[in-house]
Image (spheres, rainbow, N blue to C red):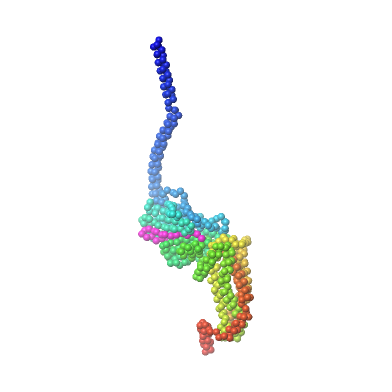
Amino acid sequence: MEEKKLDIRSIIGFILIFGILVWIMYNNAPDEAVIAKEKAQKEQVLQQEKSRTEAAKQAAITAQDTTVTNTEKLAKLKGSLGEFAYSATLPAPAADFTVIENDLLSLKIANKGGYIVDVVVKKYERFTKNSGELVQLIRDNNAELNIPLLTKDNRQLNTKDLNFEPILTKEGENQVLTLRLKASANQFLEYRYVLKPKEYMLDFSIRSQGLNGVWDTTKPLMLDWSMKTYRNEKSISYDNRYTELIYEHENGKDSNLGQSKHSEVGVKDVTYIAFKQHFFTSILLTDTPFKNVNLASENLVHDESIDTTFTKSFKAEIPLAVTGGEVNYKMNWYYGPTDYKILNEYKRNLDEVVPLGWGIFGWINRYIFIPLYGFLSDFIPHGIAIIVFTILVRIVMSPITYKSYLSQAKMKIIRPEVNELNEKYKKDPMKKQQETMKLYSKAGVSPMAGCLPAVAQIPVFYALFQFFPSAIELRQKSFLWADDLSSYDAVYQLPFKIPVYGDHISIFPILAALAIFFYMKMTTGDQQASAPQQEGMPDMSKIMKIMIYVSPFMMLIFFNNYASGLSLYYFISNTITIGIMFVIKNYIVNEKKLHAQIQENKTKEKPQSRFQKKMQEMMEQAEQQKKLK
């Protein structure tokens, strides 16, 4: 019985132990989800490895196919491009153009051709202020830069049609764009552009490497630069009048092709070429003078009502010397305003691009008018600055005005005595001339004294005529009704066009014409009274009467299309001169006192000048010879 109980206990114990083991094994069994996840991860890793292997195999196959394709392409392109076929097989850049810019300029350079295809001058607007359109000197293929390449296998290629490889880098704050037309990895023609901060001037160079055996080096390379100049100003005629090709050659000589319909010239030792527009210019400069350059200019404005987009077409054919089979030129581009101050700062004679006049006229503008007006316009508005500028000029010129009037007054006083001599010796011209000169000498009167002041004013008059149209400071600056002092101040648009006058009415030319009319009306009487009629000479009194009406009319017609700032100057100037003449005539010069002084002078022995003595001796000799005959 005891043994039976023991067996039952043992069996129960085994059952409990087995149950515990089963429970432990159940709780420690692996999760099926985990197993599935681990399995999936392993399969993913295996798949990735398989994919990488396949990709590597495919890449190898693709590379092999590309090499075969480029080789075939290169062989095919060599038939048309020769050694430069290599450039056409290079990977295409992300964009067709590369843009470099600073605060003043934005330049777009094409990879095909390697030349500038877009130039925006940021701080200036076209036509009128707030037009919303910035000045663009180059756009829509109006300019090209090309080098025709003659290869040794007699192929004629043009760089403008070939692909350059662009590389944009920085040197400090300078942006550097290098473009290479490649014949192989180490054989190329390179254009290099360097744009500096706050500069209108770019560094530009052309050089070659390893092309000695590629191109024909028996002749110089020819750099062809051409441009059709866009109209940027309100007046097409005014813009075109000041658009011209200017160049410096032969150690500093400055010349231009003028305003004719078509002009061509060949020049030597050229250091810069400027495609100048009225207020903006594009200039190519070189450190190494171009030996023999062909330049051409063509006027594109034949009908101002139709030809309103372009003004002129310029072309320059520039030889680039080849040395040792290679070419290497350091140059510059200037794209910006035709501003005397900016151009003069470069110290490369670029100020000659601004038409300030030659000789003494240019000297007056450079050293007097430009500094004076620049000083005034720095702190007062431009319209007021012109008025103050005019007042200062007239004050400085007032002594000359005084001398001119004084001479006229003296001649007027002795006019009756001169007429008596003319009547007394009318049959003896030589004697009449001798006696008239004696009268002038005794009275202390010189007929030339009235002419010299007028002649002295000519340089100032002409200098101002050049200054105002060239002053970019006046561009799009308003005053009263004029919205642009550098252009005409139209207040009414005519429904038709009058030849020479135009299709609008400007107010400042009308005011200037009225002022000069009253000035001439005021002074012509005195001039007629002081100028004795000379035998055989035209009647000056009649001519002066005609000029009273002709001069204002001419100003009214021709100045209608000129800068309103210039018309404003002449209006203020003539108005001030009228005031000065009124004061001189009524409060300074007393004709009674002047007459008494002349009579007193007659009683005095006045020593003759060397010139007067010589003239008198010549007349006496002529008189003696006449008597002997």
Viewer-nearest residue: 330 or 95:
330
Direction bottom: furthest residue: 628
Q: Position of residue 88 (x, y in %)?
A: 42, 50
Q: Residue at x 41, y 20 (%)?
A: 17
Secondary structure, magenta segment, majority class: strand
Q: Residue at x 55, y 68 (%)?
A: 464
| The N terminus - image quarter | top left
325 drawn magenta:
yes
Q: Residue at x 40, y 45 (%)?
A: 66
Residue 75 located left or right of residue 627? left
In the image, is residue 25 above or below residue 598?
A: above
Number of numbered labels in the structure image: 0
Direction top: furthest residue: 1
Viewer-nearest residue: 498 or 580:
580
Viewer-nearest residue: 541 or 31:
31
Query: The magenta stretch spans which residues?
Result: 315-337
Residue 236 located left or right of residue 213? right
Q: Is residue 177 visible?
A: no
Q: Position of residue 588 (x, y in %)?
A: 61, 76
Q: Position of residue 508 (x, y in %)?
A: 61, 65
Q: To which quarter of the image does residue 466 belong?
A: bottom right
Residue 180 located left or right of residue 103? left
